[in-house]
Image (cartoon, helix red, strand yellow):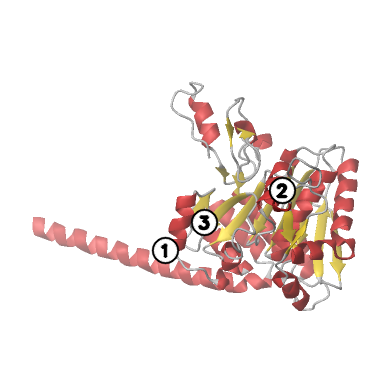
Amino acid sequence: MFTPKAGIGGHQHFRQSVLMKFLWEECSIGSEIYYCNNPTTRTVNVGYGPRMTLEHQPVFVFETAGNLLFFSALVYLDEHSPIDNFEQAVKTAMSAYDLQEYKIFHDPELQVRAIVAWSSKEVVVVFRGTKERANIKSDVMAWRTVHPRMPRSGKTAIGRWWRKPLVHYGFWRSFASNNIGDRVVQLVSSLVVAGKCDLKVRLTGHSLGGALAILCAYEVARGCKSFLSTEQIICYTFGAPRVGNKYAAREFERLVPALWNVVNNVDMVVFSGKLFKMYNHPGLRVLIDSKGDILVRPSVLELALRHFFFTERIRDHLLRNYFFSMLEVCRRRPVLRERLMQQGRAFKKFKKVFQSMDKRDRRDSHNATSATTEFEEEEESEGEDIV
């Protein structure tokens, strides 16, 4: 993040706005919720994408991440299962943005599943992560293929082979299977046109679903660029693996600058798979952990220190552990935390999270009571000594 020196612009409000890269709630700054809005010509690099002026710097909104996390959990549920209360979970997730309708997309061949929910002002697109055996097969197809719809870098139209935008073959195969990705994009495009360009499109997903959400976000931005600005497309992923090489990442960030990758602790799926720099993460990174810490847009040094002190674990990749860390982060925001807990109770897969939270709350309450008792006893002993 660009840090302005003292005296630039001469206004304290300017410095505070430029340094702002994190918000708790979506209503904090109204229409300026996703981007810092400051008139300046200074530019800054964002990931692999082009240099951006400071007024176009995306801002991470914690409440948005919490709402989209529930959509990522919703898409895992089976609407025909007697165990999953699908309708209640749908109402809970859609109430976050007052969404009115939804449509489920399913590809039985590769077991790709997506849900599109919408209202007159909002569209939410979510893809399911790895759940079936066919999804695991797609995950291990780690060779690369040229993205057929991305412009190629280089002086010629063909481009040199090392400058081609390459993406994960298994992820692209899942996105293109039976045109499920194109069908999702067509529905979103029709909603955008009918909404007279006032819609905000939010895309999300966990694990494999996050990779598919990134591919879909690019297609939506590319197909609706005459109707949508880059500020109207927001993508939050949870534990998403690397999707393509650095040239593909650069193209993702050019059309979708508000691309946030939320990472829990040292998620093995996120931090592995670089394969000698064959794959790179697009977008901006947000680190959370079970201790309640959050780090927005960490530096290279901060990432290195995190790897030095912590080891990669596959259990950090579980969606319920993402939810647990999110609750710990907003522990000091009781209103927001209570709202997330109320929404999370609609999902049975988060039952263990609430059991862990209750144990931690009882332990903290016991420790606080013990500390208070010890303090009172010390005060009484001091008073006796004085007497």
In the foreground, 384 or 304 = 304
Q: Earlier in the sequence, mark 3 or mark 2?
A: 2
Left or right, 287 with reference to 53: left
Which is nearer the N-term, disc 2 or disc 1?
2
Callout 2: helix, strand or loop?
helix
Question: Which kind of residue does numbered mark 2 sit on?
Answer: Phe
Q: Mark 3: which secondary structure?
A: helix
Q: Nearer the viewer, residue 243 or 315?
A: 243
Q: Residue at x 78, y 75 (%)?
A: 134
Which amino acid type is marked by label 3? Val
Nearest to viewer (mark 2 / mark 1): 2
- Write down the residue under mark 3: 329
Residue density around tag 3, few if under 14, some if 14–19, many if 20 or more, within 10 Å:
some
Instruction: Give the Cα separation between the discs numbered 3 and 2.
Output: 29 Å
Percent position of residue 124, x then y: 77, 53
- Drawn side of residue 345 relative to residue 372, left or right: right
**Residue where numbered disc 1 is placed:** 309
Name the residue tied to disc 2.
252
* x and y, in percent, of residue 233 in the image: 74, 44
